[in-house]
Amino acid sequence: MRVSIIGGGLMGMTLAYHLVKAGVDVTVLEQGAELGGMSGELVFDQGLRVPRSQQTFVPSDSGLQALCAELGIDNELVFQSARAGFLHQEEIHPLSNIIDFLRFPILGLRDRIRLGNLIWRARSPMDWEILDAVTAKDWLLETVGGEVFERLWKPLLEAKFDWVYDHVSAAFVWAWLNRMSSIRTAPHMAGSIGYLKRGHYALIEALAGAIRSHGGKIETGVRVREIELTQDGVGSIRTSKQAETFDRVIAAIATPNFMHLIPSASSIYLQQLGQSKYLGLICPVMVLEKPLTDYWTLHLTDPNYPFATIIETPHPTQSDLSLVYLPRYTAPDNDWMGVSDEDIRKAWISHLKPLFPEFDEQQVRWFAVTRSRYVEPIYAIHAARHTPKFATPYTNLYLANSSQVFPELPTSEAVINHARRLAQEILRQPMNSVSVQAVP
Ligand SMILES: Cc1cc2nc3c(=O)[nH]c(=O)nc-3n(C[C@H](O)[C@H](O)[C@H](O)COP(=O)(O)OP(=O)(O)OC[C@H]3O[C@@H](n4cnc5c(N)ncnc54)[C@H](O)[C@@H]3O)c2cc1C
């Protein structure tokens, strides 16, 4: 069986790995010059490599840790203190353990108790189908009240979901609280967060090595432009280099990108896919000579900043350098997408200075901006109804992406587990090859 996987991100690479291990002839086609997608790397001059986005895992992410062990890179797994806080009215308020929580000045005592109660409840499983029918806003207003919502949840939701924050399902907030509270353990509720020493790219590299050693093929710099659809199902796929046929084609890419590849699909199917909405992301990263904060993550409560979170870690291999990510989630067509890197740098840094008076732009050794139009599915209410299935209406054509992990969060852990299950599903199906003419 010849299988083509479109997309060399974590999903595509994990799928390819499980399939080649089972003896399938797999070819991964990745449009980028490097593999990894969101788990990729930026390479600065002097060869400094920096994770494209800051990727962490929680101690209960067993699928990711097992995959690293299987690939022989579990020595890359490290944990650091999950020191978190809020930047409110230009002051930092830690929120990393029970003492911080008891002292947290942004909320009054009664509101702290209500919030604490919600966080405690979120540690248990919940009927997500009920929560999926309610907006996060309505649910939070009812459970924690207007004050906690306005001061804490609204800025958090706006930071993550920008213009659609009030459509997001309560199931998302529950899943997020459940994951975040799982890292904190009694009695002090302090927690730790894991990451790979060389970033998630170490995992991508190890997957690539294993795929090749099992005879799989990986082609980078090859953009798939169209998937031909025939009456029998999937035909050939046309890439920036050639047209080729496979027995099965798995598109491991975001749903809007998949839609562009199948213009001849039925309007009903395209309409269904069109209901899956995505967030875009602009993510400047600074490499600093000295740390900006001593927090892993700081949430900003003021919507006037162009970024809403400050995420900081030491450089995975050069501990004298500090990496600061300043992400802004946006609509895929938000104006910021077209703003030059230089103007983004000016805007972002001008907002950092009042917050950190000791920060000096001279400390910025490297600065880069990454942009992605379709970075993460939006879990709007009734998300389950709109989630596209792995099997498409076209025989031997499949779609695999992180929107399908709902009601889980679209984390690396969820992607790794989903890819493993999908590979099993492919392996269970009877071989039914479709042979068609190449597109001229
Ligand atoms: C800013 C950010 C921070 C995150 N932090 C965390 C975290 O801390 N912990 C965590 O667990 N998860 C995190 N995630 C989520 C995690 O990164 C994703 O779930 C995971 O990387 C998704 O992988 P993917 O393969 O589905 O998608 P992608 O990484 O987007 O890969 C898709 C690939 O397909 C390629 N492609 C697209 N179209 C074509 C085409 N036509 N032809 C060929 N190739 C194509 C792309 O170039 C890309 O390489 C984060 C995500 C973001 C955006």
Image (spheres, rainbow, N blue to C red):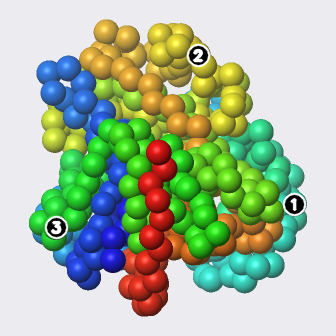
Q: Nearer the viewer, mark 3 or mark 2?
A: 3
The answer to whether mark 1 is within 8 Å of ligand 1 is no
| C-alpha distance separating marks 3 and 1 | 52 Å
- Decide: is 232 above or below 54: below
Q: What label does residue 339 carry, if any?
A: 2
Say which residue appears at 22% left-offset and 34% top-offset: 49
Instruction: Give the foreground label among 2 and 1.
Output: 2
Residue 181 is situated, as x and y percent measured from the top left of the image, at: 53, 67
Depth order, front residue of 316/271: 271
Q: Position of residue 285 (x, y in %)?
A: 40, 29
Is the Cβ of the residue at disc 3 closer than 8 Å to that at disc 2?
no
Q: CA distance from mark 2 to mark 1?
A: 35 Å
User: Cβ–Cβ below 8 Å for labels 2 and 1?
Assistant: no
Position of 43 with respect to 39 (left or right) is left
- Which of disc 2 and disc 3 is earlier in sequence? 3
> Compared to 164, does 409 lie above or below?
below
Image position, residue 341 (x, y; %):
48, 16
Query: Of the residues under marks 2 and 1, which one precedes in the sequence?
Result: 1
Q: Which residue is mark 3?
A: 215
Residue 138: mark:
1
Q: Alpha-carbon neighbours of circle 3 within 10 Å: few (<14), some, or many (≥20)?
A: some
Amino acid, disc 2: Val
What residue lies at 16% left-to-right and 67% top-to-bottom? 215
